[in-house]
Amino acid sequence: MHSTDLVTVICAAVLSLGLIASYKHTFGGSSYLTNKWWLGLDASCVYGVTTLQIVAAVSFLGMLVEWGRRAPYGGLFDHKNRPYGLASCVSTLLAASIVWALMLDSGRHWLVALSLVVVAVCALALVVGAFTECKPRLTIVLFSLLFGTITVLADGVGWNTRFLLQTTTHALGGEGAFATNSS
């Protein structure tokens, strides 16, 4: 294993443990599927998105395993020209995910939203990295697309929009964008 691959593995392992700890801290007292951070989404949406999040997590791990077996050659994460590019991208993505989980109850709504934007940008970089290798590998391309679709569209756009609509409406003294109509 090349030293830059080892750095990527170590960063991913340490930050993944940090991510698990941050989720345990944030969601430890409630079920992930029924906690308040689903922001009132219908249970069927929660189960559907959660299923896709599991696919995204497996895809992320698969992508890292494949890149670990053979380092990126050419493209955005070329191991010779950008030896720590992949490690930096993965580390930034996982660190932003940790920030998201830890900041949910902080009242710093801008930081919560920004952390998911950072995750989405890193996910897009992983897709670019997969497609720009000299000889793109099907497994990495597919894994990056599955991971990117969920982290960019479901989390970065869908959840973030819902979160910002609710928090900004509350901050302005309203009931929230998704308050139920009692009439």
Image (spheres, grey):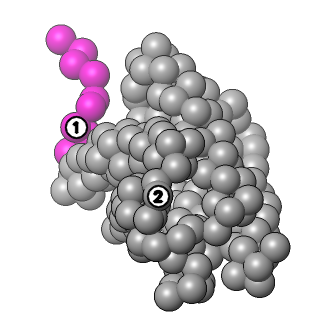
| Amino acid type for the residue under numbered disc 1 | Ala
Q: Is residue 165 left or right of residue 150?
A: left
- Rendered view: 6 above or below 67: below
- Rendered view: 125 above or below 40: below
Task: Give me the residue at 51% from left, 85% from top.
Answer: 82
Task: Give me the residue at 27% from left, 31% from top.
Answer: 178
The crowd level at tag 1 (other Cα within 10 Å; few <14, some 14-19, many 20+) is some
* Residue 140, percent from left and from top: 54, 49
Q: Which stretch appears magenta?
A: 174-183
- Residue 36 visible somewhere in the drawing: no
| Amino acid type for the residue under numbered disc 2 | Lys
Residue for badge 1: 177
Residue 175 magenta? yes
Q: Nearer the viewer, residue 64 or 81?
A: 81
Q: Nearer the viewer, residue 113 or 8?
A: 8
- Residue 86 visible somewhere in the drawing: yes
Helix, strand or loop status at disc 1: loop
